[in-house]
Image (cartoon, rainbow, N blue to C red):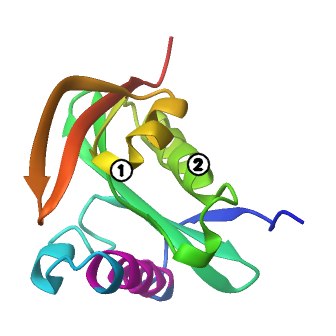
Amino acid sequence: MKPMLDVQVVRTEEQLAHCLSVRRKVFVEEQGVPEQLETDELDNLSSGARHVLAVHGDQPVGTGRWKRYAADAAKLQRIAVLPDWRGHGFGLAILHALEASALAEGCDRAILDAQVHARRFYEQAGYAAESEDIFDDAGIPHIRMEKRLIG
């Protein structure tokens, strides 16, 4: 049985705390990203970044955020799903919620720096690599990808 998907736009401090908890478990504990690199000035409700929270019942299971990258572009970041919930559609639901939010705020393209191991996931969601250049971010290989949100 497939779990019920619920992705919420973050509007409260409690929701944001759940996002940060998911990110800590995935990026810091699971992937070994230094804690001081995982959070930044965009991790508050007044920063201009838009956060989403995926929940199953009342359990937070995933998150993501986007920030304005250019006049017409959003940069999607910090997309994470807890290990036990991967493969159930939460990642794609988070991606779609971020894209819809960015589109509603006038962005017609989305850019993201994908962990190389997740490249296929993003390609299946319509993203294409800008180039084949691989770069290091927090000790993890990444590739820049982009998708047009309209047209």
Residue at image coords 26%, 74% = 43
Q: Position of residue 26 (x, y in %)?
A: 38, 77
Start-end of magenta stretch: 15-28
Q: Amino acid at mark 1?
A: His
Query: How many residues crowd mark 2 within 10 Å: few (<14), some (14–19), many (20+)?
Result: some
Q: Is residue 120 magenta?
A: no
Corner quadrant of residue 33:
bottom left
> Which element is circle 2 on?
helix
Labels 2, 1: front one:
1
Q: Position of residue 135 (x, y in %)?
A: 10, 45
Left or right: 92, with 25 as reference point: right
Residue placed most toward the observer, 63 or 126? 126
Corner quadrant of residue 130:
top left
Corner quadrant of residue 21:
bottom left
> Most prominent secondary structure in the magenta stretch?
helix
Which residue lies under the disc numbered 1? 117
Number of dots carrying numbers: 2
Q: CA distance from mark 2 to mark 1?
A: 16 Å
Which residue lies under the disc numbered 2? 92
